[in-house]
Image: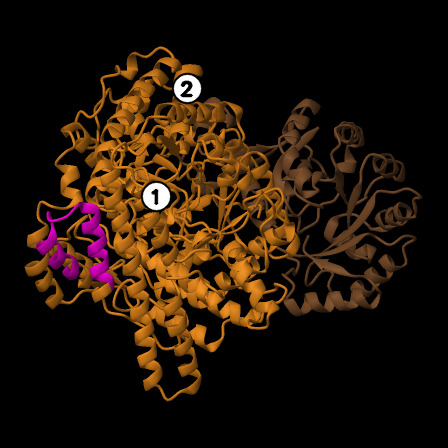
Amino acid sequence: MRLFDVKRFAIHDGPGIRTTLFMKGCPLHCVWCHNPEGISYEPTRLFTASKCIHCGAHETEGVDACPTLALQVAGKDWTLEEILKTVEKERQVMEESGGGVTLCGGEPLMHPEALVEVLEALGKKGFHRTVDTTLYASWETVEHVAAHAELFMVDLKHMDSVQHEKYTGVGNEHILENIQRFSAMKQRPQLWIRIPLIAGVNNDEENLEKTALFISSLPSIPEQVNLLPYHDVGKAKHTRMGTKYNPKGYEMSVPTEEQLAQAQEIFNRYGITTIIGG
Amino acid sequence: MKYPLTYPGNDGGMNERIKRLRKQSIDTPTTLTIERALIETAFYKENYGKMPNCILRARNFYEICRKKTIYIGEDELIVGERGPKPKAVPTFPELTCHTVEDLHTLNTRELQPYFISEEDIATYEREVIPYWQGRTQRERIFSHVSKEWEEAYHAGVFTEFMEQRAGGHTAMDGKMYQRGLLDCKKRIAERIASLDYINDPLATDKQQELEAMDISCDAAILFAERHAELAEKMARETKDEKRRAELLKIADVCRWVPAHAPRDMQEAIQMYWFVHLGTVTELNGWDCMNPGHIDQHLWPFYKKGIEDGTLTREKAKELISCFWIKFNNQPAPPKVGVTALESGTYNDFTNINIGGIDREGRNAVNEISYMILEVQEELHELQPGLSVHVAKVTPDEFILAATKVIRQGHGYPSVFNPDTYTKELMRQGKSREDANEGGCSGCIEVGAFGKEAYILTGYLNTPKILEITLNNGLDPVSGKKLGLETGDPRTFTSYEQLYEAYHRQMLYFVNMKLAVNNYIERMFSLYAPATFLSLFIDDCIEKGQDYYSGGARYNTTYIQCTGLGTITDCLSTLKTHVFETGRYTMDEILKAVAANWEGEEKMRQYIINHTPFFGNDNDEADAIAVKVYDDLVDAIEGHPNTRGGKTQLNMLSTTCHNYFGSVCGASVNGRMAKFAISDGTSPAHGADTQGPTSVVKSLGKLDQTKSGGTLLNVRFVPEMMKSEEDLRKLGSLIRTYFNLGGHHIQFNVVDTETLHDAQKHPERYRDLLVRVAGYSDYFNDMTPQLQNEIIARTENEAF
C-alpha cells in the first residue's frame, strides 16, 4: 500500500484516538485540498526552504541523506507487515479511548485491493476501522470495502454538480448516488457525513438547504454530521511541492462564527444535529 | 484562551471577599523580614551551649512564637502568617546567613526580588551576621567536604539540597484532625514516664527530645492564643457587626486548635494552617509542608456541617479559598549561590493531593475534590500547587473535571498514578496501608504521608558525567580534571566499551555524593532537630526520636537523576553513527562538539534528524534509556543512611535541567552548549516527533516502580482541546500511560504565539502561569533562558 503519511495520535479522524494511514492517489483535486501531496499516485517531492542549509547532500547521497529533512519524498510503499507493526504500537491508547485505524487519502477507494487487504488484516486483529472517502468509486467497490469497515466518513462538498466539478474536477452525481445506496444498505458500517464549510464556495443558503434536504431524506439517517470549517493548511503544502495553491484564484475564506451558527441553524431546521469540527 | 466553568454545582466564581484577598496576595510585593533572625540571634547568644540542642531548638521556636508579630488581615477567615504580614519572608541564619551583599542583590534584582529596607540591612549587619559567622549549617558542610567533591559540585556534576535549607518533604496524614497538641503532650508525658534509664542507654536522649517536643506543643498553642487575643481586640474595635462575629469565631477557633482536635471545617483548616506555619517557622524545609490528601481530611467535617446545617457548599468553598490564599502569601525563603540558579522561584512547592485512593485502596474522590478544582481554577495563583491522583478506580468524570482545569493553561493540576506509586512505596518497604495513604509532594516525589522523612539530597547531572567520560575524566568547561581516566574514547572499538567507561564514571560520582550525604544528615540531627515537625510524623513520639534522627517510621534519602533523555540520545548518537554505520568517527563528532558545532551544522542536523532518540517508541533508543536508568538505580539504591533507612533514586529535575545545561558544553546529540538538558524523564527538547502516545510508550518501558518518582512534561495547544470529547481523549492518554506504569504526567497548555507575545509584552501577561517542572511559575518571573526553553518544548501539533 502506498502511503504518503502515517499519523499516530490522530484525534480528529473518527472516534477516539487513532492512527491514520494516508493513501496516495486521488481522482479529485479539490482546490482547498489540505493534503495536495496525496493527489498524485507518484512519489511527490516536498521541499521546505526554511530548513535547507544548502549542503547539497541530496545530490551526492540521495534524498534520504538530507540532514535537515528539508527535502522529503511523500509516497512510500508499505508492506502489510510494516503497517500492522506501526498500528500495533498504538493499541493501548486506541483501546483506552475507543479509537482505531483510519484509512484516508488521497482517496482510499482508488486502490480497493490494497485497501481491503489491509482492512481485513486490521479486522482480524480487532481494530476499529474507519474509511475516510469521497465515495467517488464504482458501487461495487464501495460495497466490497464496506464489508470490511465499521465506519465510513464521507465528504460532501457541493450539491450542484457544475460547482462540484469547478472546485474538485469531477461532478457529484456519482457521489450522491453512492451515498444514497450506502445509506440504504441493510447492514452498513456507520456513516458520518463531513461537510467542509468554505465561505465563498458552499456556505450559501441555497446549497446548505439542499445539502440538509439531501441528508434528511436519505433512506437511513447518518450517525453523525460534521461541519469542518475551512482552513488554508494546503497553502504551505503547495509551497513545499513547488506548486500553486488555488491557481485560479477562487474566493475562499474561513467561515465566521456567525456563518457557522447560520449553517447549523439550517441543518437544525431539517432535524440534523451538526458538530463543528471533527 | 478561557473556557466557561462547567462543573456541576459551581456557583460561578469567587465572592467579593475572596477577590479582595486574592488581589492583595498577588499585588503585595515579596519582602524579607529580619524579625525571626533577630529573635533567634538574641536567643542563641544567650542560650547556645547551655542546654541540649533539641531543647535549644524547641525553646528557640517557643521564643519566636512568643515574640513574632501577629497578623490578622481584613476579610480573613483563616489566620496566621510566617512573617509579620503577607508575603514577608523570614531568613534562617542558623542554616545560611545571607551577607550584606546577598541582601542588596535580593533587594534590587529584576527577577524575583525580595525587598528589604537599608535600615534592616544595617541592623542585620550589626545584630545578625557577626554572630552566625562560622556557625551556620552551610559552613559546617562546606568545611567538611573533600576538594574533589567541591570541584564536582562547582562544575555542576551534582547539587546539594541540604547545604542551605533543611530537608523538606513533609506531607501530613490525617492524625491532626483526630488529636490536638494537648493529646500529644499527654502521650509525650506517658512516653517519658515509661523510659527505662537502666536498660535503654539512649533513654536520656529520648527524654530530652520528648521534652523538646513538649515545649514545641506549648509554643504552637501560645502562637494560636496570641491570634485569639488579637482577634478579640479587633472584634472590640470594629464597628462592623458582621466582621465582629467573624473575628469572634476566629478567636474561638484559635483558642480551640491546635490544642484540641478540630470540631468543624473552619477549625480543621485552621488546625492544619497552624501546623503548617509552625513547621515552616521552625526551619525552612524546601518542599514546604503539605497537607497531603486534604479532600479526604476535610470530608468528614464537610459532611457533618452539611448534615447538621451549620455549613453550606458556598461557605465551605469560601473557607478553602481563604486557605488557598494563605499558601500564596508564603513565598519560599531566598536561596543563594548555585541553589538559586538551580531552583530560582518564589514557589515553595506545596503540592496538594486530591482524588486517588484512601487507606483501604478505595476511590477517594469526594465533593471536596471537585470544590478544590474549582478553587484552583478560579484563584490560579502561584501557590499552592495541585495534583490529581488517577488510579484505576478513579471515575472518568473526575479526570474530565481535572482536564478542564488543565486546559486553562495555568500549569496545574499535574496528574499522578497511585497504582504505580504505591508499588514504589511498597518496594521500599512500606506496608500496603501506609503506601495507600501516601502520595506525592514537592514536585513528583513519593512518600508515606505523615510517616516518612524522605529527604532529597541533590540532583545528578548525567549528561555532564558522559561529557566528562568523553573527555577521559576532564571537564572541558571548567578545564579541571574531575573524573576518572576511563580511556580516550577515540580508542574505543565498541559501544559496550564506551558504555562501560560511562558506567565507571557514573559510579565514581554517585559514590562521591553518597559519601558526603550521611555527614550532612548528621549535621541536621545534631544541630537542627525539628522538634515541632516531629510531633506530626509517626513514630517520632513513640520512639522518642527526632524527624532528622530516625524518628520517622520510614526514612529515605534520595538522589535525583536528571537528563535521561539527553544522555540516551547522546549514547544513541554514538552507537548509531560511530559504532554501527560508521558515518562519523568519534574524533569527528568530539571535535564538532568541542567547537559547539561551529561549521558542522550539516553533521549536527543529520544527527538530530537521523538518530533514534528517546520518546519515539523506538525500541533501540528506549533500550539505552532503560539501561541507563537501571544502572542508576543499582548505583544509588540501598545504601544505609544515618536514620536507619536507605538511599533511593528518583527522576526529578525542578529547574535544575537549565542550570545543568548551562554548565555543559555542546552534546553529541546536537544540543548546543549551555542549552537546557532534558527535564525529569521527558524526552530531550524536540526529540520526540511521533506524538504523545510514543512518548508515553517510551517512558512505559522504564520500570518506574524502582524510582521514587519520574516526571513527564507534555505540552498541548489549547486550541486543540476545545470539546469535551477532546478532553476525554486527553483522559485516555493519561489512562494509557498509567496502564503502562507511568508515575506522573503534566501538561503545559499554552500556544507558542502567546508565549512569544508574553516575552514581548510582559505587562500583559502578569497572571500567565506555566508549568516548569514539578510546579508552575509566572512566566514573567522566569529568566529569558527558561522562557525560551518553555517555548522550545515540543509542541504536539496533533492536539
Q: Is residue B315 left or right of residue A163?
A: left
Q: Which residues are magenta?
A: B38-65
* Residue indicated by mark 1: B540
> Which is closer to the viewer, label 2 or label 1?
1
Q: Residue furthest bottom?
A: B239
Residue B287 visible from this viewpoint? no
Q: Are marks 2 and 1 on the same chain?
A: yes
Q: Secondary structure at mark 2?
A: helix
Q: Between residues A220 and B18, which one lies in front from this camera angle? A: B18
Q: Between residues B646 and B445, which one lies in front from this camera angle? A: B646
Q: Secondary structure at mark 1?
A: helix
Residue B557 visible from this viewpoint? yes
Q: Position of residue B205 (x, y in %)?
A: 23, 40
| Among numbered discs 2 and 1, the one appearing first in the sequence | 1
Q: Between residues A247 and B724, which one lies in front from this camera angle? A: B724
Q: Position of residue B631 (x, y in %)?
A: 39, 23
Q: Is residue B336 above or below residue B486?
A: below
Image colour assigned to chain B: orange
Q: Is residue B636 left or right of residue B96?
A: right
Q: Gap in Å between the C-alphas at discs 2 and 1?
A: 51 Å
Q: Amino acid at mark 2?
A: Lys
Q: Is residue B662 above or below residue A214?
A: above
Chain name for mark 1: B
Q: Is residue A139 left or right of residue B333?
A: right
Residue B40 counted in the magenta span? yes
Chain name for mark 2: B
* Residue indicated by mark 2: B575
The residue lying at 26 percent from left, 64 percent from top is B83
Q: Quadrant of residue B27?
A: bottom left
Image colour assigned to chain A: brown
The residue lying at 81 percent from left, 43 percent from top is A136
